[in-house]
Image (cartoon, grey):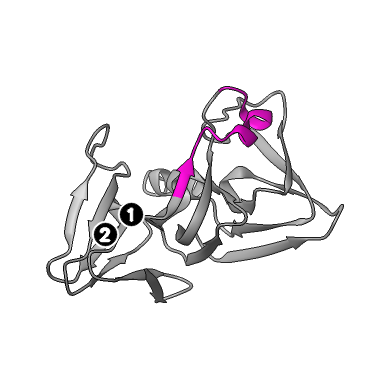
Amino acid sequence: MQVRTRHTPAFGVARLQLAPAETVLADYTALVATSYGVLVEPKLRGGSRGRRRPTTFTAPAEGGWVDLAPAVPGDVYLLELDGLGGWCVARRGVLASAATVVSDAQWAGFRALFGVDVGFLEHTSGTGSLVLSCCGAVDVVTLDSGELITVEPGHLLAYTDHTQARLRATSQALPQSVRTGDGLVLDFAGPGQLVTQTRSPRSFAEWLSTSGDGR
């Protein structure tokens, strides 16, 4: 799979160029268009209108393409996995992944963060392309050894899985949720790399829901 982007950084679209019979997993709700003959197979189990739907796209014998766009205004960002190290990514931030990329929301490395619960992150490994959906623009932060940074979960897209991470409450007075990241922050210690977004999708959705009622 080759990925080409356009209309970045404000209204990013990712074109997934597929080889003959190549398969890619993507979010059906992000679908813009495909070349003729691409097989679209949504996994409707647990899906409903307005929710993300994992979908398999398979190119015909002559190959094809799939165009995807994030639900919110912003960029698209490409990670290339080399099979040597993985990335921890925001579960709602994955736009598409090659069939050779493996995702695991119950990765053992998350136990120190979430315990036995499934949190707001998933672990990705393997080889190939991983396309992330961004709200706003992308910032890539490289941490030197011992360098520290604190990130609000709504602005986090991904980080290298060897980066030290600690989850803590912003304030005991606020409600907290490991499933959404509400009321929590992440402390990171280098070496490592982080990918963040300049807007929070959750805050953007809340703003949209109240912008027309006079508040």
Say what amino acid the circle numbered 2 marks.
Leu
Q: Which residue is mark 1?
A: 26
The image quadrant of residue 43 is top left
Disc sitting over residue 162 in the figure:
none
Residue at the (19%, 49%) spot, across then down? 41
- Measured along the vertical axis of the image, is residue 190 above or below residue 20? above
**Magenta stretch?**
102-116
Left or right of 114 in this view: 40: left
Is 9 on the left-hand or right-hand side of 25? Answer: right
Q: Residue at x 54, y 33 (%)?
A: 119
State which quadrant residue 210 falls in.
top left
Q: Of residues 84 and 111, which is closer to you in this image? A: 84
Q: Secondary structure at mark 1?
A: strand
Q: Secondary structure at mark 2?
A: strand
Q: Is disc 2 in contact with disc 1, using a CB cutoff of under 8 Å?
A: yes
- Amino acid at dot 1: Ala
The residue carrying mark 2 is: 31
Identify the residue at the far left of this view. Answer: 37
